[in-house]
Image: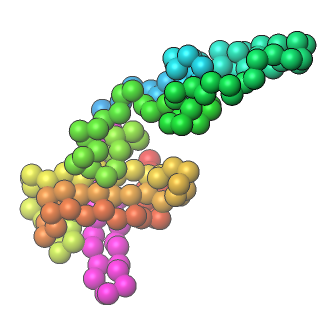
Amino acid sequence: GGRRLSVRFLGGESWIVRFPDTDEMLPQPEGVPNLVLNQISGKRVSVAEAAEQQQQKDEGNGSEGAGAPQDASPSPNKKDVAEGEPIADPNSQIDDRTAWALPLRGAYTMGASYFQPRGSVPPGMKGRCRYIYDSGPEDPGVGRLECHEGDFYKFALVPLTCLPQLKR
């Protein structure tokens, strides 16, 4: 009968969530650039360039001995961004995240009629669901399901440890 989950809650309530036979991935944002923020100039440089600049700086300090003090004039960005901290994704989907808790990256979509908290639901509901198979390093091995305008619920967000087992 296809892919489906039965979610049972501590209060005794249970939901059925069916999944389409094939996953439909949402349009993905562009890849995250591998950049760091240069503390001296404030411009974006690649990780390789930053490592090369740091190596040249270290070699210069070791051979010259007495140079200018490193933190004599602090960079204006120093208080905002720690050295080597990755910059924010320039392709972030801010508008998307105001409506959805789950990000676009790695997410799949399906109609809200697959989300059945009170039994069968007529097909063609207006709502949508979004799911991811792995939440990443902050919660490894846990998938998440988020539905908007589903049957009986305006919004539902559920962590599911069994969701990665359904991935095809």
Whole-percent x, y for residue 156 in the image: 25, 64
Viewer-nearest residue: 126 or 121:
126
Can residue 129 be seen by looking at this rendering? yes
State the colouring used for the structure image: rainbow
The residue positioned 21% from the left and 67% from the top of the image is: 116
Please state if 32 lies on the left or on the right of 7 as rendered.
Answer: right
Q: Which residue sits furthest bottom? A: 11
Q: Which residue sits furthest front? A: 72
Whole-percent x, y for residue 152 in the image: 13, 70
The residue positioned 34% from the left and 40% from the top of the image is: 104
Viewer-nearest residue: 52 or 168:
52
Q: Is residue 70 magenta?
A: no
Q: Which quarter of the image is occupied by the N terminus?
A: bottom left
Span shown in magenta: 1-25
Whole-percent x, y for residue 140 in the image: 55, 56
Q: How many marks?
A: 0
**Where, by quadrant of the figure, is residue 83 drawn?**
top right
Q: Is residue 3 magenta?
A: yes
Please state if 65 lies on the left or on the right of 71 as rendered.
Answer: right
**Where, by quadrant of the figure, is residue 19 drawn?**
bottom left
The residue positioned 34% from the left and 65% from the top of the image is: 158
Whole-percent x, y for residue 66 in the image: 86, 17
